Image (cartoon, grey):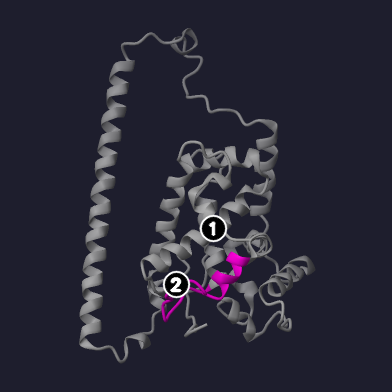
């Protein structure tokens, strides 16, 4: 992998972006021509205009939504209410109840999310070794602390320091990806698709970020997800117990596609991750999506 010497800030429980601008050391600006610099400036201006346009669209959508909600509220005050609401016995909106299968699977997933990675546990050590064997079946397994782990996209010689807030499920997600979609996993790991940047995102640590992004997007830290994406995810979970892991694979593939489409570099990782989150939320909101396989981006995955 070309030029993958990473200087990333330490994970702070993954509540801060993993790849930040402080890690850029300026070496990649050496040897640039004036044409290169002007090209970058034009690209930055174009990106800035796109961001402004996106913000204006979002503000317009919010204004429309507020106007509609205000009209509904105005009309509703003239409509008769059910007797139980008039009597004050039901002052809050009743959320749809989870069926027993959804409840059981949600609690099981939340238990998984609550397990931190512990490098002293044999089970966690074995899982890390399994990931290496899946990623590099023809290479010798390194020790748990080795510079070779950087080849997979970990920050240093000890991968256990990169999980932190991502937890053990981050490792489980990577293993699931490698086992169920080995072709896509391999192509992303080895950066085989498209014209790649000279300064690429680190594969393994990006995976930890994606796990945490999904945790937040789906509102899985709540007892019962209340976000739009979280509610739709509960429907998917009823169809497939491994919906979170499958959604992770879709998100990872989607991130790489956006990375290539926008010709992104290391410094733009956080922007691409946010863009991936927005696109995934959009696909989850589409009608007739009853499983992860119904998402348009699922077709990007190859077994």
Q: Are marks 1 and 2 in contact (CB under 8 Å)?
A: no
Seen at 60% across and 77% down, the residue is 152
Residue 199 relative to residue 97: left or right:
left
Magenta stretch, main secondary structure class: loop
Q: Quick one: label 1, few (<14), some, or many (20+) residues within 10 Å? A: many
Q: Position of residue 107 (x, y in %)?
A: 67, 43
Inter-mark Cα distance, 1 to 2: 26 Å
Seen at 61% across and 66% down, the residue is 183
Nearer to the camera, 82 or 231: 231
Q: Position of residue 104 (x, y in %)?
A: 70, 39
166 above or below 282?
below
Q: Is 192 covered by the magenta stretch?
A: yes
Report which quarter residue 129 is drawn in: bottom right
Residue at the extreme bottom of the image, as rendered: 31
Which residue lies under the disc numbered 2?
194
Residue range (magenta): 183-202
Q: How many marks?
A: 2
Q: Position of residue 289 (x, y in %)?
A: 52, 40
Seen at 48% across and 59% down, the residue is 254
Which residue lies under the disc numbered 1?
212
Query: Mark 1 or mark 2: which comes first in sequence?
Result: 2
264 above or below 54?
below
Q: Is 190 covered by the magenta stretch?
A: yes
Instruction: Say which mark, if any, is on residue 239.
Output: none
Which of the image's four quarters has the C terminus? bottom right
């Amino acid at each position: 992998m070309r030029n993958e010497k990473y200087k990333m800030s330490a994970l702070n429980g993954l509540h801060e972006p993993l790849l930040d601008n402080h890690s850029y050391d300026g070496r990649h600006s050496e040897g640039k021509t004036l044409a290169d610099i002007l090209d970058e400036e034009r690209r930055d201006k174009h990106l800035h205009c796109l961001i402004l346009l996106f913000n204006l669209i979002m503000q317009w959508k919010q204004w429309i939504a507020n106007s509609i909600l205000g009209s509904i509220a105005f009309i509703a005050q003239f409509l008769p209410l059910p007797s139980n609401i008039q009597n004050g016995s039901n002052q809050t909106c009743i959320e749809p109840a989870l069926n027993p299968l959804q409840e059981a699977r949600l609690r099981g997933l939340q238990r998984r999310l609550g397990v931190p990675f512990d490098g002293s546990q044999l089970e966690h050590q074995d899982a890390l070794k399994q990931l290496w064997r899946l990623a590099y079946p023809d290479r010798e397994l390194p020790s748990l602390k080795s510079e070779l782990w950087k080849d997979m996209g970990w920050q240093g010689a000890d991968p256990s320091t990169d999980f932190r807030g991502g937890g053990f499920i981050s490792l489980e997600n990577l293993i699931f990806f490698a086992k169920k979609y080995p072709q896509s996993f391999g192509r992303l790991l080895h950066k085989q698709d498209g014209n790649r940047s000279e300064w690429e995102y680190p594969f393994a640590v990006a995976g930890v970020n994606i796990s945490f992004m999904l945790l937040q997007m789906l509102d899985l830290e709540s007892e019962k997800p209340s976000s739009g994406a979280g509610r739709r995810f509960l429907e998917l979970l009823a169809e497939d117990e491994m919906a979170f892991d499958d959604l992770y694979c879709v998100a990872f593939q989607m991130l790489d596609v956006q990375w290539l489409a926008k010709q992104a570099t290391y410094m733009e990782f956080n922007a691409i991750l946010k863009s991936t989150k927005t696109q995934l939320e959009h696909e989850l909101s589409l009608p007739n999506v009853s499983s992860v396989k119904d998402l348009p981006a699922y077709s990007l995955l190859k077994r």
